[in-house]
Image (cartoon, grey):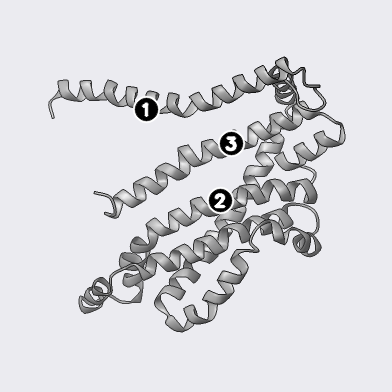
Amino acid sequence: MSALAQVDAKPSMAWKRLRSALYFVFPLLCLVFIWEFTVRIFSVHPGVFPGVGAVLKAGAESIANGSLFLHIGASLARVLVGTILAVLVGVPLGILMGVSPGVSTILTPLFRFFSVLAGIAWIPIATLWFGYGFGAITFVIFNAVFFVVAYNTLLGVASIPPQLRNAAWSLGANRWDMLKEVLLPGALPNIVTGIRTGLGFAWRGLIAAEMIATNLGLGYMLFLARDFYRTELIVFGMIVIGILWLLIDRLVLAPLERRTIERWGLVR
């Protein structure tokens, strides 16, 4: 490609990204317009549902006093630790299930049983085991991510063609080579998809757990605002939670999933 063609391609790519961002933001702006229009037309009491101005004012106050950043930092730290622990345990176990029919036969029914309990259902017993704080919430997040990641890893390993494994063995691969060169790369697209899906469950579980099991975090921020009848702060917290998840999913998880799938040849 010539230098001139490369220069022409860059504005085209930038315009494509900008247009995609506008398409994504436009429905959200429409929702804000409908929200403000409805509150004004029907004269909704602020205690029932606030207007856009009151929410922006509450947000500015929480930013000015620094409480918003403390809540965000606590929530993100819990998600990060719980997810890392879940991946470190779930991926090896999923690979073991994928290569060992006996282990898979024993554990698959247990995984199907506990997968519906993962996340919010563990909050009561987590508080009994770990008390109120970081440990209980991290445990809830771990459960939300662990089963999804492990099961997706199992599916990824199972999808690797037997001919590929046999070819690796015939070329003299040992167990470590098989894991590093065949099993992990082959299962990686499914693993990343599992992490993305599991984090969605974990984010919801996080907010619910923080309402009960801690005194810091976005969920606690909503719960505390309810006690003082500050609906504008509740709505602002909900908006922050949604925006944070959109940023995590759109800027981190979705590109990681897409590049992983493209890297390992599942998209041509």
Going from N to C along the chain, the mark reached first, 3 or 1, is 1
When the figure is inspected, residue 68 is found, relative to residue 127, above or below; the finding is above
Describe the element under mark 1 as helix, strand or loop: helix
Badge 1: residue crowd in 10 Å (few <14, some 14–19, many ≥20): few
The residue drawn where x is 46% and y is 45% is 253
Q: Quick one: SS at disc 2? A: helix
At 59% from the left and 52% from the top, the residue drawn is 201
Q: Is residue 221 above or below residue 98?
A: above
- Whether residue 47 is visible, yes or no, is yes
Residue 104: x and y in percent read: 48, 78
Q: Which mark is residue 199?
A: 2
Q: CA distance from mark 3 to mark 1?
A: 20 Å
In this rendering, does residue 217 appear at all?
A: no
The label number, if any, that marks residue 249 in the structure image: none
Residue at 33% across, 26% down? 16
The residue lying at 20 percent from left, 25 percent from top is 6
Q: Position of residue 30 (x, y in %)?
A: 55, 22
Classify 10 Å Cα crowding around label 2: few (below 14), some (14-19), many (20 and above): many
Q: Nearer the viewer, residue 91 or 239?
A: 239
Q: Amino acid at mark 3?
A: Leu
Along the horizontal axis of the image, is 158 left or right of 25? Answer: left
Neighbour class for label 3 at 10 Å: few (<14), some, many (≥20)?
some
Task: Tell me where residue 176 appears, x and y as whole percent.
Answer: 35, 72
Residue designated by label 3: 244
Would residue 263 be found to the left or right of residue 238 on screen? left
Query: Which residue in the rendered view is the most extreme toward the bottom?
Result: 102
* Residue 113 against residue 50 in the figure, above or below: below
- The relative height of residue 223 versus residue 19 in the rendered view (above or below) is below
- The answer to which of marks 2 and 3 sits earlier in the sequence is 2
Image-based side of 241 in relation to 4, left or right: right
Instruction: Find residue 17 and name its label.
Output: 1
Position in image of residue 27 (x %, y %): 51, 27
